[in-house]
Amino acid sequence: MTSLSSTYPDALVQAPLVVAITGASGSVIGFRFVKAALQMGIPVELVMTEKSLQVIHDELDYKVTGHTEEDKAIRLLEHLKLPSDAPLKFFGNHRLDAPPASGTHLTRGMVIVPCSMGTLGRIAAGIGDNLVARSADVTLKEGRPLVLVPRESPLNQIHLRNMLTLSQAGAHMVPPMLTFYLKDFSSVDGQVNYVLGKIFDVLRIPHQLSARWGQ
Ligand SMILES: Cc1cc2nc3c(=O)[nH]c(=O)nc-3n(C[C@H](O)[C@H](O)[C@H](O)COP(=O)(O)O)c2cc1C
C-alpha cells in the first residue's frame, strides 16, 4: 500500500479547482473563468447557485439544462466550445454529499465568481447550508486559497464588514474592477481577461490573459 505522504504532493498538483457561480451580475466572468481553467488543463468542480441560473439566463441567454449532473457538464462544455472530455464535473448546490463538501477531498482551492452579497454573507456567518457556502467554509478551514469576486455597487457597511471578516479569515477579495492603465479601452472582452488574470495571479497559476505593467 502506498503511504499518504508519498502520494500527497502529486495528488495536490492534479487536484481540481472548485468554482462557484452565484446570482450576482457578471456570469460571463464565471463562464470565462471555467473555460480558461479547463483550457489550462486544470480539472474544475463547478457548483452554481439556484439564483445564478436565472442571472445566466438573463445575461447570457443560456439555460443550464440536462437531467443529470453529467448531462449538465457535457452541455456546458458544448456551450463553451470545449471538447467533451475536458475535466469538468458539475454538482447541484443542494449536494452537501458532493466531494468539495469534505476537507478530506483534496482541491487546489476555490473561486467564487461572481460572488453575490448573499453568498458572501452566508460564508462570513459560517452558514454552510448549501454546497457553495459549505465548500468555501471547508476551503478556509483547510487553509487552501479561497478567492471571492464580489460584485455589487455601491457597497453598504454590511457588505464591507463581511468582506473584512472573510479577508481576516484568509480569503482573497478580487472585485471585478476595470483596468485603465493597460489602456485596453476597446472591449469588455479585454476587461474580463484582466479580471481572470487577477484571479489566476492570486492562485499563483501562470497565465497570459492580459498584459502586465512594465512588460
Ligand atoms: C439580473 C440580476 C442581477 C443581480 N446582480 C446582483 C449583483 O450584482 N450582486 C448581488 O449581490 N446580487 C445581485 N442580484 C441578487 C442576487 O441574485 C440575490 O441576492 C440572490 O439571492 C443571491 O443568491 P445566491 O448567493 O445564492 O446566488 C442580482 C439578481 C438578478 C436577478
Image (cartoon, helix red, strand yellow):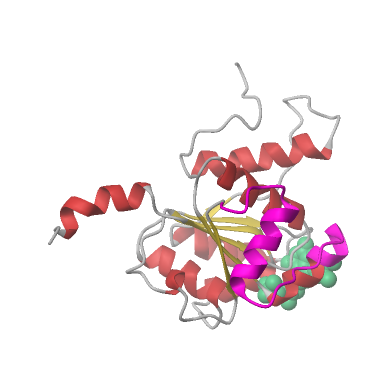
| Left or right, residue 102 beside residue 94 | left
- Residue 97's place in the image compared with 78, above or below, is below
Quadrant including the N terminus:
bottom left
Q: Residue furthest front?
A: 84
- Residue 90 at x, y percent in the picture: 58, 67
Determine if residue 120 is in view: no
Question: Residue 74: within the magenta?
Answer: yes
In the foreground, 175 or 81: 81
Q: Position of residue 113 (x, y in %)?
A: 64, 57
**Relative depth, front residue between 213 and 20:** 20
Q: At 69% from the left edge and 66% from the top edge, which residue is drawn?
A: 116
The answer to whether residue 141 is left or right of residue 24 is left
Q: Is residue 214 left or right of residue 108?
A: right
The outermost residue toward the top is: 215
The segment highlighted magenta reads 56-85
**Image quarter of residue 121:** bottom right
Q: Quadrant of the C terminus?
A: top right
Could you tell me residue 131's position as x and y percent?
Answer: 54, 75
Q: Quadrant of ligand 1?
A: bottom right
Q: How many marks?
A: 0
Which residue: 54% across, 40% down?
A: 40
Write down the quadrant of residue 55 in the picture. bottom right
109 magenta-colored? no
Residue 161 visible in image:
yes
Q: Nearer the viewer, residue 196 or 94?
A: 94
With respect to residue 64, does 144 lie above or below? above
Residue 185, image x, y percentages: 84, 30
Q: Name the residue: 51% across, 63% down.
A: 166
